């Protein structure tokens, strides 16, 4: 992804700009360009105000107010490079559609820059382009990538096309209500999309943090699931893990409930852990069912709620006797690793398992 | 009794903790089965919620959109996990799944028998079925029969519960009620250890309120399936591959989610795409390189289905290709809302419908359900018997495979059109049964004959009401008629040739005679001049003269005869017109075949006149005394006449001379209407009550409160399932009887209130024209009446409707008789086309000076198959309020009342589109025109609109309806 934060891992990449407003400074029909520019800047300001009311933290909206080469004024290459970064780093592209926009080479370039990094949408959020119609235009002449956008109409559709001007154009106040109504609608839609983008980025960041924690030598929170009837084995395993400075949850082995499932308290504790260990005792039948119910069903329930992976392994306190081919195959088919606690090198296996499990 | 194809045990087998991975990580379009639990990801939170709810109350209705994954969640999620958890805590687990199908109670009994380990044991099933007869009191008895031990758990899944509503609609109302009673009983007092899960489509939730106690039970335990969020989708995509030592890159997962869009087909399209990509990949490491983003998962699906089809047909086997088409046509349908839906059929039924032999059909079905294809269920591995239900794996296939779903050329469209063709043939066949002269035209015989021969099988027609033998009879009769006409025209041609020969011969002989006579005369003069002899020749000339005079007289007689005949025909036509003119004013009715007229005789008694013989028909003595009838109407077969005077009504069978008084109305009767299939008569009057009578026995079948004030109009719709009443206060009531019997199944559809100012534009013709309507057959009369009423509402005099049979033109015409009136005719034609009928102008010469044709007299001749679907369209709008206010205005504007129908459709964005019509149906052309017009105004979804317009069950909707 071509964000400005190119050197960071994907999970830490962000959009430096939330909204990039792309518009043409050109005049509608050979008259002064300042009016359209002023109107566009006012729209950007008003849009920022609207979005700020929606509790979007650190909102950044960018509108290019510099003058342009193809619109009469020279523009340096350095400026263009900066602008390119801004465009590429924008989560949302807002296009002010007008006849000059369709003619402008700059606008076309801005669009290409943005599309080049966002099409196909790397976030799978979709709909991050918003078209605001500043004046009537021929939709057939629209750029291919914008065709099909219905857009937000900022002019009176019932007027003759050659007479239609944007609402509040040139400071008019007669159509202020129409202007504000459309603006509110636009802001609501943009905010919704920005929140979706941020949610995806948050997920990625959370996963990355998880990976970082798992990669540490020790100190992770492990949920050690064991049954009450296997309390001595559970206590011994717990102590061995604590000796290696792992934090162990819960504080005691559990009894199998009447329904066979886990209670809400256990569920939420599993979701807060860095790894899930299922105690393997000589009671192979109990392990088989614990692997399926705890290691599969409840682990994935936890994954769904925390939105990041949760490695799971059998902590085998028995050894070869417990590890028949069928059981090992079951574990593999459930995505559950096997840590032979009878071997001397089990602590290294735990570290490797945690790193691999969230990788 | 059912063969129990709808019931099956659903457990994980002997060891619920054995983890057996399915053959591949992605099942494709088909739903997840219980054995697929190891690869079922992304719905864990929903699974846990459902299990928690079930733990709380042992009864739960899980509902959601069609194809949203209810079945997968319940099977691979809930049932698998429940079984594992319960087994883990030491319980014995039994799970049985059933669908209501065509025998809900027997299926439930069989399901319970299977739970007891006695599945298929007829006696055990019957005993359980007997218990179910207790309905609301069944819970205790069921608990006793099940005898669940404290360590036993039984899960009963009633899948696709909505099938019950269809079953009820199709006549199983009592059984459906008993079935829901049993469920309500089990919900109220569940036997310990029993879990009861129902799945159904959310749009049917409202139907639950039709059964006592069911809505309450649903309210206490229901779960609306949420959509999967993005993170859940990513896990559903990425987790299964890991179990197969493979991987799906995060970037690919994102691209697939983006391409699938957020619509209802998102999940199935992704599942199918993954199955395909996985099958193609050797490395089992799927990344963006394996998939071109933006390709479109829909295209992938459509292309895959095409490739399976090519494989089945070997590239060009046309017979096989037709079999595939007929198979999928049989498995799809348009739903109540016009959307494409699945239509599961047993394998046996499919054999019958497609006309294919067992082996060929099995091969095709197997190809489409093969591992790695999964377009049909049951999945490969499940043996197919005759009673096995074959179903399309997911409705996404119907929507995405262009061969099925293309709005212009798709099979679904073909099926719909063929269905319409068959239904119109059936109507014609029924008309032909009543009146053998009602056969198809020669061109239609040839075309439809070929069409019928190309049908896959006679059983196909059952979907559209059957009647294969009747239609065969119609075609045979039409063919005979065609042959007869062919022979006749051949004979005529031959006669013409002979006539011509004779004429020329006579002329030749005359000429010869003339020349000969001339020559002889001259010779005679010469002779007389030379030698005054030869009287023999003179005699000959006299004889010839006499012969000539005789011929001339004969010719004059023949011409006169012709003229007389013409005058007679014209007089008869006028008579019929005059009689028709009166029918609006008094108790005058003409039988549907035009042979009889019922009217008030000079003695103010009801009299029946045979128009052909001109003689009176004797009425039953009991009815002969019906004095001063104000209303009279013939039944559609012309056999019965209903008449009314003040609050009294009579029904008479004039052939069998039976007569019956109908007593009940408290005040004056205003309207009489026969049911289109006969058998029922509806009456309505000033007491605001509509009464429906059995036309055979005179028994009062139903009493309906139709209007606050007085009932001014009544009619049945062509399907016979609805009756429309109009009150003087402008209220329209639509009464619906699903069985068409109007006995105990009548429900009131939402009323349309009529008020507001009349604003409908009138026909822009200076003085009121007169228009005679001509139709081909009796079946068109209802539509013609609607037109007549609409014309009258426009200030046009529309005296009557003429039945013209074979004389009807191939394209509908508006005939005018004077060149000077062409402009007015064109205005009228334009107005008619705006209202929905495409008619062409036709000038009929020879009447410019005729006194029989009044000024501005026109005739509308509807083409033979046109009017049946040409009900006038008043408006097509997007706004619901506007639609109904237009309907109200239309109602108000008309001098007479007529049936205003408001069709509703949805566009792609879910917006409602409405068409206001007078009467029932539209032609395909009309619907297309509407679509085109609607597109200009805001791009609605053409397909959704069309199918909703054409569907049989899209009849009418009132506000709030």
Image: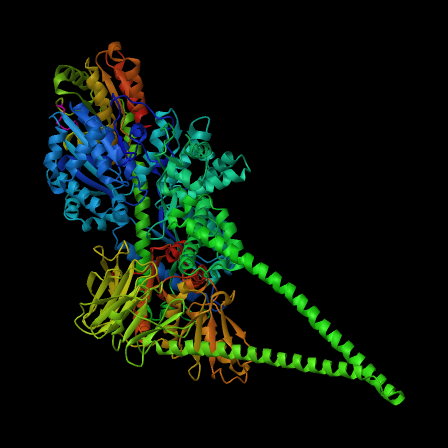
Which residues fall within the magenta stretch? A254-260
Could you say which quadrant of the image residue A240 lies in? top left
Left or right of B543? Residue B56 is left
Q: Where B276 sits versus A175, above or below?
A: above
Rendered residue at 25%/47% (across/down): B168
Name the dominant secondary structure of the magenta segment.
loop
Left or right of A154? Residue B169 is left
Could you say which quadrant of the image residue B702 lies in? bottom left
Query: Viewer-proximal residue, B540 or B71?
Result: B540
Image spot of residue B635 (x, y percent): 33, 65
Image spot of residue B960 (x, y percent): 25, 61
Q: Where B8 sits versus A23, above or below?
A: above
> Which image quarter is the C terminus of chain A in?
top left
Q: Is residue A149 magenta?
A: no
Image spot of residue B213 (x, y percent): 14, 47
Rendered residue at 16%/28% (across/down): B153
Query: Viewer-proximal residue, B285 or A112?
Result: B285
> Which image quarter is the N terminus of chain A in?
top left
């Amino acid at each position: 992804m071509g964000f400005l934060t190119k050197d960071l891992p994907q999970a830490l990449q962000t959009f430096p700009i939330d909204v990039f407003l792309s518009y043409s400074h050109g005049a509608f029909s050979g008259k002064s360009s300042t009016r359209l520019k002023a109107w566009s800047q006012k729209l950007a300001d008003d849009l920022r105000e609207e979005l700020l009311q929606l509790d979007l933290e650190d909102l950044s909206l960018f509108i290019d107010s510099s003058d342009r080469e193809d619109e009469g004024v020279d523009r340096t290459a350095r400026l263009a490079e900066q602008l390119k970064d801004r465009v590429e780093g924008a989560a949302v592209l807002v296009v002010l559609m007008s006849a000059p926009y369709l003619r402008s080479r700059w606008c076309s370039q801005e669009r290409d820059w943005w599309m080049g990094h966002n099409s196909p949408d790397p976030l799978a959020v979709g709909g991050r382009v918003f078209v605001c119609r500043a004046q009537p235009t021929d939709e057939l002449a629209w750029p291919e990538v914008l065709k099909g956008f219905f857009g937000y109409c900022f002019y009176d559709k019932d007027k003759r096309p050659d007479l239609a001007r944007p609402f509040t154009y040139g400071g008019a106040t007669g159509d202020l209500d129409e202007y504000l109504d459309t603006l509110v609608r636009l802001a609501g839609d943009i905010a919704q999309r920005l929140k979706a983008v941020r949610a995806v980025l948050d997920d990625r960041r959370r996963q990355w943090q998880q990976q970082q924690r798992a990669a540490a030598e020790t100190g992770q929170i492990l949920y050690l699931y064991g049954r009450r009837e296997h309390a001595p084995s559970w206590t011994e395993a717990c102590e061995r893990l604590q000796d290696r400075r792992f934090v162990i949850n819960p504080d005691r082995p559990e009894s199998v409930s009447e329904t066979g499932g886990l209670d809400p308290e256990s569920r939420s504790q599993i979701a807060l852990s860095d790894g899930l260990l299922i105690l393997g005792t000589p009671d192979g039948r109990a392990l088989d069912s614990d692997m399926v119910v705890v290691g599969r069903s409840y682990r994935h329930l936890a994954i769904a709620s925390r939105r990041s992976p949760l490695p799971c392994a059998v902590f085998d306190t028995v050894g070869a006797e417990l590890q028949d081919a069928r059981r090992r195959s079951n574990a593999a088919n459930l995505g559950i690793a096997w840590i032979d606690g009878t071997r001397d090198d089990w602590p290294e296996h735990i570290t490797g398992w945690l790193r691999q499990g969230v990788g | 009794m059912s063969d129990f194809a709808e019931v099956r045990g659903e457990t994980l087998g002997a060891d619920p903790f054995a983890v057996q991975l399915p053959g591949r990580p992605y099942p494709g379009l088909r739903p997840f089965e219980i054995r697929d639990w190891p690869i079922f990801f992304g719905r864990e939170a929903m699974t846990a919620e459902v299990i928690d709810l079930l733990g709380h109350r042992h009864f739960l209705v899980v509902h959601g959109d069609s194809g949203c994954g209810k079945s997968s969640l319940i099977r691979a999620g809930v049932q698998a996990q429940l079984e594992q958890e319960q087994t883990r805590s030491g319980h014995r687990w039994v799970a049985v799944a059933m669908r209501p199908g065509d025998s809900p109670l027997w299926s439930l009994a069989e399901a319970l028998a299977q739970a007891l380990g006695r599945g298929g044991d007829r006696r055990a099933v019957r005993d359980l079925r007997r218990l179910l007869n207790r309905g609301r009191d069944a819970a205790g008895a069921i608990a006793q029969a099940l005898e669940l031990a404290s360590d036993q758990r039984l899960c009963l899944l009633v899948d696709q519960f909505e099938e019950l509503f269809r079953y009820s609609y199709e006549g199983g109302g009592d059984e459906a009620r008993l079935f829901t009673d049993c469920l309500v009983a089990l919900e109220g007092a569940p036997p310990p250890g029993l879990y009861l899960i129902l799945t159904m489509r959310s749009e049917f939730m409202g139907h639950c309120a039709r059964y006592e106690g069911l809505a309450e039970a649903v309210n206490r335990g229901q779960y609306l399936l949420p959509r999967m969020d993005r993170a859940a989708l990513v896990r559903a995509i990425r987790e299964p591959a890991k179990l197969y030592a493979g991987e799906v890159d995060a970037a690919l997962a994102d691209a697939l989610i983006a391409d699938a869009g957020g619509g209802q087909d998102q999940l199935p399209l992704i599942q199918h795409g993954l199955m395909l990509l996985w099958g193609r990949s050797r490395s089992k490491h799927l990344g963006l390189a394996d998939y071109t983003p933006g390709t479109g998962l829909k295209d992938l699906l459509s292309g895959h289905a095409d490739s399976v089809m090519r494989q089945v047909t070997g590239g060009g086997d046309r017979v096989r290709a037709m079999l595939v088409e007929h198979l999928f046509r049989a498995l799809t349908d348009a739903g109540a809302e016009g959307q494409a839906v699945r239509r599961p059929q047993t394998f046996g039924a499919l054999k019958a419908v497609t006309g294919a032999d067992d082996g060929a059909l099995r091969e095709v079905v197997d190809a489409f359900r093969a591992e790695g294809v999964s377009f049909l269920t049951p999945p490969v591995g499940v043996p197919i018997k005759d009673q096995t239900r074959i179903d399309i794996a997911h409705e996404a296939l119907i929507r995405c495979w262009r061969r099925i779903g293309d709005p212009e050329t798709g099979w679904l469209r073909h099926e719909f059109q063929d269905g319409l063709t068959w239904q119109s043939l059936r109507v014609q066949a029924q008309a032909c049964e009543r009146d053998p002269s009602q056969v198809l035209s020669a061109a239609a015989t040839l075309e439809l004959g070929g069409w019928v021969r190309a049908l896959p099988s006679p059983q196909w027609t059952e979907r559209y009401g059957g009647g294969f033998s009747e239609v065969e009879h119609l075609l045979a009769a039409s063919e005979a008629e065609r042959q007869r006409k062919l022979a006749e025209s051949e004979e005529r041609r031959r006669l013409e040739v002979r006539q011509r020969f004779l004429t020329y011969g006579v002329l030749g002989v005359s000429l010869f005679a003339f020349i000969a006579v001339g020559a002889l005369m001259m010779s005679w003069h010469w002779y007389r001049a030379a030698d005054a002899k030869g009287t023999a020749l003179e005699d000959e000339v006299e004889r010839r003269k006499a012969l000539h005079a005789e011929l001339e007289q004969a010719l004059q007689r023949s011409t006169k005869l012709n003229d007389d005949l013409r005058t007679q025909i014209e007089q008869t036509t006028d008579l019929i017109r005059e009689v028709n003119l009166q029918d609006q004013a008094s108790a005058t009715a003409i039988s549907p075949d035009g042979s009889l007229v019922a009217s008030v005789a000079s003695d103010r008694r009801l009299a029946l006149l045979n128009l052909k013989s001109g003689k009176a028909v004797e009425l039953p003595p009991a009815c002969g005394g019906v004095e001063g009838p104000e209303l009279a109407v013939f039944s559609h077969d012309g056999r019965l006449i209903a008449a009314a005077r003040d609050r009294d009504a009579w029904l008479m069978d004039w052939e069998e001379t039976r007569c019956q008084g109908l007593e009940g109305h408290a005040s004056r009767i205003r309207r009489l209407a026969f049911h289109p299939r006969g058998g029922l008569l509806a009456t309505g009057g000033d007491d605001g009550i509509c009464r429906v009578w059995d036309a055979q026995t005179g028994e009062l079948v139903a009493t309906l409160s139709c209007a606050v004030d007085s009932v001014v109009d009544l009619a049945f719709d062509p399907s016979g399932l609805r009756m429309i009443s109009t009150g003087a206060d402008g209220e329209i009531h639509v009464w619906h009887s699903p069985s068409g019997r109007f006995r105990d199944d009548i429900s009131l559809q939402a009323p349309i209130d009529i008020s507001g100012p009349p604003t409908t534009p009138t026909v822009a013709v200076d003085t009121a024209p007169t228009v005679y309507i001509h139709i081909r057959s009796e079946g068109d009369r209802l539509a013609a009446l609607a037109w007549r009423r609409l014309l009258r509402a426009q200030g046009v005099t529309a005296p009557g409707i003429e039945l013209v049979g074979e004389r009807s033109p191939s394209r509908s015409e508006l005939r005018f008789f004077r060149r000077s009136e062409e402009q007015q005719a064109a205005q009228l034609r334009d107005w008619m086309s705006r209202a929905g009928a495409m008619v062409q102008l036709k000038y009929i010469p020879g009447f410019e000076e005729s006194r029989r044709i009044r000024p501005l007299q026109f005739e509308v001749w509807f083409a033979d198959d046109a009017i049946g679907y040409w009900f006038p369209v008043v408006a097509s709008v997007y706004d619901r309020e506007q639609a109904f206010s237009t309907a109200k205005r239309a109602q108000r504007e008309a001098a007479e009342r007529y049936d205003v129908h408001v069709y509703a459709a949805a566009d792609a964005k879910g917006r409602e589109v409405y068409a206001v019509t007078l009467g029932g149906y539209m032609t395909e052309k009309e619907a297309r025109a509407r679509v085109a017009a609607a597109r200009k105004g805001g791009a609605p979804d053409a397909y959704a609109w069309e199918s909703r317009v054409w569907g049989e069950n899209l009849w009418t909707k009132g506000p709030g309806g």
